[in-house]
Amino acid sequence: MRKQFKKYGVIFDLDGTLWDSSYQVGKAWQEVFDRYELGIAVTEEKMAVMMGRTIPEIGEAILPHIEPERRSEILKACCDEECARLGLYGGKLYDGVAELIPELAKRYSLFIVSNCEDGYIQTFMRAHGVEAHISDIECIGRTGLHKGDNIRLIVERNQLEKAVYAGDTERDMHAAHSAGLPFIHAAYGFGKGFEPEYSISSFRELPALLNKVFEV
């Protein structure tokens, strides 16, 4: 039996790392935009470009002409609708995630930190049956903090001896480093064009790389 390292934490980003939800999110946002008669088309490709940004950042990019109070109302409706859709249909899990999350949880403590609103991570966990394998979560929607600070919160709250952050964007890498953690680039995700210290081209490569990162 392989040794357990429960004080070693693997902290995951969500979009572009564990799943691609851009299709269902795009459908949800389009429904809300149509309801508000905004005359804006939301494609899967457009949503994919936005993945990893905070909701206010997405709002500024897609709805720059809408006054702030109404924009906040529309964005809240979008978040509610996307969670409803994802709760019904789920997202597209990356290859290996469904099988390996339960296996990794036997050896390490697993966490999720994302730049999302509260409820989004919970929807992912329920939709794909991984709640029992995730020890803790954090997001900007609950704390109002930047991702690096939320990563640090997870480490401190769970008294981790060692930890690593896995994400797909350069912003994820900077967040990990600001929290003092090594970074694993999910190169199959949305973010390209930067040089991380570790990289995987498939989620299935993660267990072997964790042995190297944690020197176990």
Image (cartoon, rainbow, N blue to C red):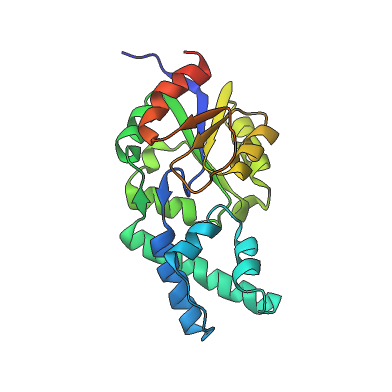
Quarter of the image where one finds residue 207: top left
Residue most toward the front?
193
Observer-nearest of 6 and 209: 209
Q: How many marks?
A: 0
Instruction: Please name the residue shown 45% across and 51% down the image.
Output: 122
Q: Position of residue 6 (x, y in %)?
A: 47, 22
Residue 84 image point, x, y percent? 40, 65
Residue that appears at 65% across and 35% down: 152
Q: Quadrant of the N terminus?
A: top left
Indicate whether 167 appears above or below 144. Answer: above
Does 18 sit left or right of 184 as displayed? left
- Across and down, in percent, residue 143 comes to 65, 50
In terms of image quadrants, where is residue 38?
bottom right
Position of 107 with respect to 147 (left or right) is left
Q: Quadrant of residue 62?
A: bottom right
Residue 31, compared with residue 12, is above or below; it is below
**Residue drawn 35% across the image and 14% down it:** 2
Q: Residue at x 68, y 49 (%)?
A: 145
Residue 175 lies left or right of residue 46; in this view the side is right
Q: Residue 36, relative to residue 120: is it above or below?
A: below
The residue most toward the bottom is 37
Q: Nearer the viewer, residue 148 or 155?
A: 148
Task: Look at the picture and state if 215 lies above or below 14.
Answer: above
Provide residue 146's location: percent of width, then percent of height.
68, 47
